[in-house]
Amino acid sequence: MTTQVFQLPDLGEGLTEAELVKWLVAVGDTITVDQPIAEVETAKALVEVPSPYAGTVETLHGTPGDTLHVGNPLITIALTTDDGAPRPGALDYREEERAGITVSEDSDDEASGNELIGYGTSGGATTRRTRRSKRATKVSGNGTADPSRTSAAVSAPRVISPLVRLLAKRHGVDISRLTGSGPDGVILRADVMAAIDQPVQQFEAATPQSTQPVTKSAAEHVDAPAGLAVSERVPVTGVRKMIADQMVRSRSIIPDATSWIDVDVTELLELQARLKADNPETAPSLLGLIARFVTAALRRYPVLNTRFVESDDGAELVYFDGINLGIATDSERGLVVPAVEHAERYSARELTGQIKELVDKARRGQCTVAELTRGTFTLNNYGVLGVDGAAAIINAPEVAIMGVGRIIDRPWVVEGELAVRKVTELTLSFDHRVTDGATGSAFLTAVADAMQHPTSVLADL
């Protein structure tokens, strides 16, 4: 009987690793095509991995809690047929990765958009359009590849993702000296990060390492800089590791700037109260109203709804035909940002329902990878945490994020008279490569004006 090793597939959006949460099968189990075999956590979402093969489980490559890299073995299956061939289309994503290796490094195909969902049921067809490089492998007149060109392509650094090349370039890593840990030696983001951290690892290697377990008692070790006993060491894994990587990426790549403004939202609260009194079940929430104002302002200042993309050929701003509004959500698994697709198409009432549905899914850990990575602008209501303001970190690759602080009673001048009003603070952090303070301030003022005089503004939305 033929055995087949199934490797962890590309989970979409260029993700290179996932944490194994639990196995859904055991050694000796008989499984069918597309049967979920494991639950992994990546991109702040839980994803079930289906099997592209039918047969008997022989080996499980990993234990819950392990970090698995894309392209590494996940499970070994004894196939029910002896031909050893996967079902048609089951490994299209891997074939595309290998095809990308023979294309020159200037290929404009990022090869990072393959989604896990549906990879096992493609039936050999794919709707993804693969673009050829301007300097693709040269083919001779008889239809065979030129040996000299093919040899050069194979010996070149095997890097598929432009993001990996950009990361290496920014940190001065020579990718030609790296050994890839991906399939067929493909250089992954983890390989570049390992090279970046190499000086630290060399220093640690020169320091005697303890053979004790990761968790240590206070008497076993004393931290030299602090002079205090170490009570516990907790590995940073899973969602917390992903959040850390994303925040470092944002801070290291994006030169951000922050503007803020205080807003009198007394009229907005009164309007929302009247709408709720008229029809409590369909009344828009305060966040739904603010989201509507944000989408309206983004239509006036679309540069804040773009992406700044760098490649070997230069930099460009990518504009979108629509707004995917991300909503920063505090969940048990950490901070996640599910996004309402085409938020500009919805009214404040409809946005309220869309936001509620997405936030509930995010807190249950049921959002898809697409829902968590498709955002083009983020709205962060950190006021519910009891703070007035914050210089939020941009959710890369987005270029801006707007925050809303708590609403409190404050003295405010109204028509020359001092009064007690409901006031909140708005903040906007934006990528200074994309735009300047004038545009950022104009956007923030537009949202503030709408919140201060909602009745007149809603008539124009």
Image (cartoon, rainbow, N blue to C red):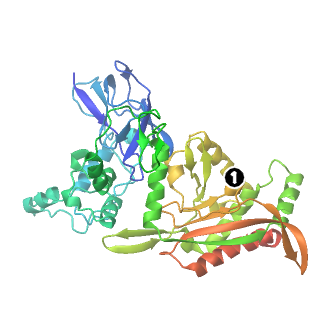
Q: Nearer the viewer, residue 400 or 259?
A: 259
Q: Is residue 145 visible?
A: no
- Give the secondary structure at mark 1: helix
Quarter of the N terminus within the rendering:
top left
* Residue 365 located left or right of residue 447: left
The residue under label 1 is 385
Rendered-image quadrant of the C terminus:
bottom right
Find the residue positioned furthest to the front. 227
**Quadrant of residue 261 within the rendered picture:** bottom right
Q: Residue at x 55, y 68 (%)?
A: 305
Q: Nearer the viewer, residue 360 or 215?
A: 215
Q: Please, which residue is most extreme toward the top here?
A: 28
- Residue at 67% over, 56% down: 382
Q: Viewer-proximal residue, 397 or 1?
A: 397
Residue 404 relative to residue 41: left or right: right
Percent from the top left, x then y, of residue 94? Answer: 29, 45
Give residue 126's position: percent from left, percent from top. Answer: 36, 49
Residue at (82% x, 69% y) in the render = 455
* Residue 457, visible in the rendered structure: yes
Question: Mark 1: few, some, or many residues within 10 Å (few <14, many ≥20)?
Answer: few
Q: How many marks?
A: 1
- Residue 293 at what x, y percent from top left? 70, 67
The location of residue 314, given as percent across then percent down, is: 35, 74
Q: Is residue 293 above or below residue 102?
A: below
* Residue 25 in which image quadrant: top left
| Mark 1 residue type | Leu
Q: Look at the picture and state if 42 lies above or below 326.
A: above
In the picture, measured across the screen, residue 136 lies left or right of residue 220, that is left
